[in-house]
């Protein structure tokens, strides 16, 4: 199958830690070994990437599961073929609010903060319907049981969320690695209020998805790629330090120290899981909850969006 | 500039206005009405009349820059208003501010099949004619009022047109410069047989230069007098002619 | 041209444009989820209108837009005039302006957040910023280009003092250029509304961002058409006012 | 004013600005991680320069910028002139333009991806777009404002044909306005570079986006200063050329 | 307009130029050199000379619009170039294109402590003086060349200044309009005792109006003649005076 002319795959990614397996595959040359030429393209956000995918500009994508599901309802032929990370989103607080709620936030601490400061706590997240918004609401109203009158949710882009948090315009925000670590290094007052698992068990995160056409045309190459993906996930677990050096070439080269990335890999916000099977029920749960709070109209059939063949074949050997 | 173009077919009307009325805007009253004017090849016609009567307007219609409301205008028997081979001296100098003097003078030549060397030669010749040979490289804003007007004259002269329309060309010039240019103009007219339409507010000048004088007057204006003039430069015939015109204009003076 | 003729031609142009768009959307040469056909807009409008979202978003954006536009235009014209008139001030600020000018709205967002928090004011600030630059440069050039002869006229008639010169000669003389800047700013302001509302301030931009992240392109297009309409009407009105104000030009 | 004086004043202005910035950054009235002091820039520059990233990003962005700028400026001037000269064409396009004008660069990104893929061309397209609009409006107004007397002069001297009229009267007469538009476009182009490179096309904008999402603000500021410098130099050169070209103005 | 301001302190020099030289640009040769000119209150001085000699330039220096290179310029004993209470008629009409005719005429009044009613009254009076009462609501572009020039005259007259500087004000006017305005100017001068500096290229006009005639000539230009004139309107003294001046100018004619 190693043809003389290698298969070309264009892969899009969002520059977050959860895309680390992709960087390792490319950095270690594992794709080349499998006769695949990779072209990596960075995207600011999932929707832009999905648009590019719908236009046939990229073949695979490392991004959140939500845009993929949405794209399918719009008739775009994409499937999830593997998982990359789960439980990415955490809630970080800063300044007086972090002090006020401490490490074990309760409904009362929220109420007390609102009363003491004469204003509600402002928590930044992404727009309604997005994963961060849904899981944050789940944590606030289902887990901690905060009175909705005591908080104010501010929807914005993910990058703006971090800036707003550091600027003190927000009291807390949903963020993910590597920014969690970076933020904490920059501002010691930043504290984690909830981990991803606390917010929503098995909180769905970043998945590997592919265009149906590509799956049909190059099944072997995809299989090889998923195998490499599994290897990369293992490497991260076994050797976070080594992994962080490779990943740093792609993510924040010259902007971050590899040690920061290593800390992020070891932090509570990174949990790499390649198996896509477990994601299905988690997504279903999440969608049910989204429907319950009215930020989604209906439930999309989730299982159809998953194509387990490549993962199953890869673990079988 | 002083080349004779073809044989001046004396007697043919090169400018022919038939029952023309002219106005600005749609609903405003007309400025000029009932203008019948036939100018023969080679004649030197002066147009006089009070300020605001419509002299410039008439010239603009002849040049094809303004459409007559009614009536027919033909130049060289051609009723199309465009591409008339006329040279025009505007009442304001109207130089292109982004061209140096010599380039301004060449402006009219650029539409003609003339080499750039020849253009330059003719522009320099025309500048010499108006006594501005030293000013070729100046910008228009660096000129005095009279100098600007002379550049405008040079520009029209450089084209060497069959028909020359001049709107108070010597208005801003001192007596001596004016006399020089009047003499030049007479010489050119004599040598080349151009047809010249010459607006002026100076009766002496009209009588001195033209062989036919058209007086505009009234509101709306019309041609009130059309005199053949054969007065020489000085002497009693000249003075009489001027005085008579002055009286006639005064009679029709209104505005 | 007569107004009626020109209106007919405009309608023709718009209809042609819409037909082309519809044809492209239906032909399938582009993925349908990227370009919804214009015929999908009315339905989308009804849904959004019934739920009251449309009205709320339009009202919010309009207020950001108007505040930002007036502020940016006012400051742009003021600073542009000042720089064009006083050589010393111009020289002082020339390079500072060159440093600040190319900073995109996106890069200003942190500052907007810092100074104004996540508030309506922050959005207006960002809009004001882009409008400011366009007006600054247009005014600068227009004031520089005012006929020096007319300024001289002012001095000759005792109107050479700062205030008289400014309001009687410089600004009227620069008006055509200033108005052209204002007009360009009118559109640039709407272009920025979207960017300015991407960080948690509600309005058309936020709704578009939301819809876009859910790939609800028909909603995106609805709001794009909404913006187009709002802009179109304001630009049209502006042109009417302009042709009044400049009726002294032939 | 003498060139030397004005240069000294400019330097003074910039130094004052930098000092103010340093003071604000050090005072702690704003979170340090949001505004690094300017003194942090040289060190950041050295790191980026040594790793070769800086050169690569500057080269990439410069090429997007130049292509987009020339294309946008050329088309903007062309269409602006056409619309200003032909009433029929103007009427046809007036409302279509009004619909397209307010669409922000961000909303064009899907189209750019669709038409050009994720390529340098897409970035250039987005830059060209903003530059286009500014030039379109500036040119439109400038051409409209050309002295009718001079156009008449052209007709009188057999230069009333389209080409002659255009190149000998209309464009030279509109030049001050057109140049002011080009100048505004010069800056607007850089403002858009950042937005245009946020979707996977490498360049300053991408690097800034990366750095900003990792909160490496000193790198963000380094690139902002880089853009400021690139823009400042080009604007300065443009002004020199402009004062040459317009030397016929007093 | 026709109010006598104060008692004309006859004999005092209201315009005083001492050894003045004037030029454009830094390194260009001067246009005018060695100008010594002292104009007494109430006098009517005509300035003549060939086109481009520097007449307008001299007027602009007196009006404080252009700085002399060397030498001293005082107006009313005041050396500051600003806030000189002069009225100026430009050689080009120089109307503000965005003001209607009547508003253009009011322009100079807006700096004075005058009510708006009074402004309007004086503007209308000035327009009547130049025979343009029907044109108050027109835009400048709707006027003929001569009408524009008359609006410029009305603007200066409306201010009713002590010193009136006029740069070829009647240059574009027909004989009759010009005669009317000359008569008005003489009347105003007689009644109000204004000091008038009047540039003209028409020697008859100079002799007819002025009681002192200054001839500029040469390169660089200087005052070549400064004659007291007492010729009446017609008659042999007038003709002689004109002829003599013509000869003298011809002697110094160069440019
Ligand atoms: N801005 C300028 N820069 C350089 N030279 C100038 C400028 N303005 C005028 N000149 C020159 O100065 C000389 C005097 O000009 P001025 O306008 O005073 O002449 P004038 O006597 O009024 O002539 P005219 O009767 O033609 O109006 C002329 O030779 C002219 O070319
Ligand atoms: N654009 C215009 N719109 C309306 N009326 C105009 C326009 N141009 C000229 N007029 C009017 O038309 C009449 C004739 O103007 P024209 O310029 O032909 O006069 P003229 O005889 O050349 O006068 P002058 O000797 O003062 O130059 C004038 O009363 C003038 O007010
Ligand atoms: Mg006229
Ligand atoms: Mg002069």
Image (cartoon, coloured by chain):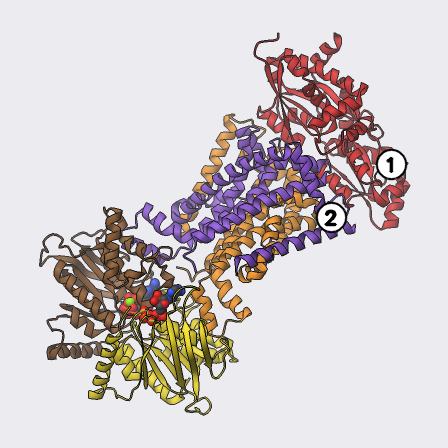
Chain colours: A red, B brown, C orange, D purple, E yellow
Rendering quarter of residue E208: bottom left
Q: Which residue is mark 1?
A: A145
Image coordinates of residue C173 in percent, x first then y, are 47, 62
Chain letter of the residue carrying label 2 = C
Question: Is D56 rendered above or below residue A26?
Answer: below
Q: Is mark 1 within 8 Å of ligand 2?
A: no
Q: Nearer the viewer, residue C49 or B139?
A: B139
Residue depicted at 15% across the width and 55% down the height: B3
In what quadrant does ligand 1 lie?
bottom left
Q: Is residue A39 left or right of residue E204?
A: right
Q: Is residue C24 left or right of residue A252?
A: left
Q: Secondary structure at mark 2?
A: helix
Distance CA(mark 1)–CA(mark 2): 31 Å
Kindly check if marks 1 and 2 are in contact, taking CB atoms under 8 A apart as contact.
Answer: no
Within 10 Å of the Cα at label 2, are there few (<14), some (14-19), or many (20+) other Cα atoms?
A: many
The answer as to whether the residues below labels 1 and 2 share one chain is no
Question: Is A189 rendered above or below residue E177?
Answer: above
Quarter of the image containing the N terminus of chain E?
A: bottom left
Q: Nearer the viewer, residue B39 or B158?
A: B158
Q: Is mark 2 within 8 Å of ligand 1?
A: no
Q: Which residue is mark 2?
A: C114
Chain letter of the residue carrying label 1 = A
Q: Nearer the viewer, residue E17 or E125?
A: E17
Q: Nearer the viewer, residue A218 or D248?
A: D248
């Amino acid at each position: 199958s190693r043809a003389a002319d290698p298969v070309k795959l264009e892969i899009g990614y969002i520059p977050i830690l959860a895309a680390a397996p992709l960087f390792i595959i490319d950095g270690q040359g594992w794709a080349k070994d499998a006769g695949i030429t990779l072209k990596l393209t960075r995207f600011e956000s999932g929707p832009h990437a999905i648009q590019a995918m719908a236009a046939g500009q990229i073949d695979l994508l490392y991004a959140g599961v939500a845009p993929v599901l949405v794209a399918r309802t719009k008739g775009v032929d994409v499937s999830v073929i593997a998982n990359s990370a789960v439980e990415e989103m955490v809630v970080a607080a800063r300044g007086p609010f972090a002090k006020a709620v401490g490490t074990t936030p309760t409904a009362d601490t929220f109420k007390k903060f609102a009363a003491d400061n004469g204003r509600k706590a402002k928590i930044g997240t992404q727009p309604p319907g997005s994963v961060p918004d849904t899981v944050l609401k789940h944590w606030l109203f289902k887990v901690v049981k905060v009175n909705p009158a005591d908080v104010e949710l501010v929807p914005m882009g993910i990058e703006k969320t971090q800036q707003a948090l550091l600027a003190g315009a927000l009291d807390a925000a949903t963020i993910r690695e590597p920014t969690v670590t970076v933020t904490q290094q920059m501002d010691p007052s930043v504290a984690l209020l909830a981990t991803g698992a606390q917010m929503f068990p098995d909180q769905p995160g970043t998945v590997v998805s592919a265009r149906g056409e590509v799956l049909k045309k190059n099944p072997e190459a995809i299989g090889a790629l998923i195998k490499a993906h599994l290897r990369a996930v293992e490497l991260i677990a076994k050797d976070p330090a080594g992994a962080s050096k490779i990943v740093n070439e792609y993510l924040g080269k010259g902007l971050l120290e590899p040690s920061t990335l290593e800390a992020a890999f070891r932090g509570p916000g990174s949990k790499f899981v390649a198996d896509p099977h477990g994601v299905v029920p988690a997504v279903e749960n999440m969608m049910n909850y989204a429907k319950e709070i009215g930020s989604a109209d209906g439930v999309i059939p989730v299982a159809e969006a998953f194509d387990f063949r490549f993962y199953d074949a890869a673990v079988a050997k | 500039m002083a080349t004779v173009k073809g044989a001046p077919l004396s007697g043919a009307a090169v400018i022919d206005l038939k029952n023309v009325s002219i106005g600005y805007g749609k609903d405003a009253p007309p400025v000029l009405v009932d203008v019948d004017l036939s100018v023969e090849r080679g004649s030197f016609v002066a147009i006089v009349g009070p300020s605001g009567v419509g002299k410039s307007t008439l010239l603009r219609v002849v040049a094809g820059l303004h459409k007559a409301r009614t009536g027919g205008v033909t130049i060289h028997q051609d009723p199309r208003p465009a591409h008339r081979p006329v040279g025009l001296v505007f009442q304001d100098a109207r130089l292109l501010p982004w061209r140096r003097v010599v380039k301004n003078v060449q402006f009219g030549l650029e539409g003609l099949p003339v080499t750039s060397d020849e253009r330059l030669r003719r522009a320099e010749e025309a500048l010499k004619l108006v006594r501005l040979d030293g000013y070729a490289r100046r910008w228009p804003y660096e000129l005095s009022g009279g100098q600007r007007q002379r550049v405008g004259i040079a520009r029209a002269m450089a084209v060497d047109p069959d028909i020359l329309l001049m709107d108070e060309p010597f208005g801003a010039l001192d007596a001596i410069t004016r006399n020089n240019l009047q003499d030049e103009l007479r010489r050119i007219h004599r040598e080349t047989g151009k047809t010249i339409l010459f607006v002026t507010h100076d009766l002496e000048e009209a009588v001195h230069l033209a062989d036919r004088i058209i007086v505009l007057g009234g509101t709306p204006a019309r041609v009130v007098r059309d005199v053949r003039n054969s007065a020489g430069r000085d002497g009693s015939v000249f003075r009489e002619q001027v005085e008579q015109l002055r009286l006639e204009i005064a009679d029709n003076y209104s505005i | 041209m007569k107004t009626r003729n020109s209106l007919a031609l405009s309608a023709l142009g718009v209809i042609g444009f819409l037909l082309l768009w519809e044809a492209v959307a239906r032909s399938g040469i582009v993925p349908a989820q990227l370009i919804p056909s214009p015929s999908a807009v009315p339905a989308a409008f009804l849904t959004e209108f019934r739920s009251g979202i449309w009205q709320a978003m339009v009202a919010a954006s309009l207020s950001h837009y108007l505040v930002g536009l007036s502020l940016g235009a006012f400051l742009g014209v003021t600073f542009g005039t000042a720089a064009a008139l006083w050589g010393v001030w111009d020289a002082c600020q020339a390079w500072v302006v060159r440093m600040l000018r190319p900073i995109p709205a996106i890069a200003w967002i942190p500052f907007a957040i810092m100074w104004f928090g996540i508030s309506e004011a922050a959005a207006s600030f960002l809009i004001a910023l882009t409008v400011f630059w366009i007006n600054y440069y247009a005014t600068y050039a227009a004031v520089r280009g005012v006929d020096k002869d007319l300024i001289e006229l002012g001095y000759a008639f005792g109107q050479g003092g700062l205030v008289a010169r400014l309001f009687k000669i410089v600004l009227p003389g620069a008006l055509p250029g200033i108005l052209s800047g204002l007009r360009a700013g009118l559109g640039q302001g709407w272009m920025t509304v979207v960017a300015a509302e991407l960080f948690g301030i509600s309005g058309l931009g936020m709704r578009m961002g939301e819809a876009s992240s859910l790939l609800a392109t028909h909603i995106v297009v609805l709001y794009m058409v909404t913006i187009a309409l709002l802009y179109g009407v304001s630009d049209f009105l502006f042109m009417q006012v302009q042709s009044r104000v400049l009726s002294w030009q032939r």
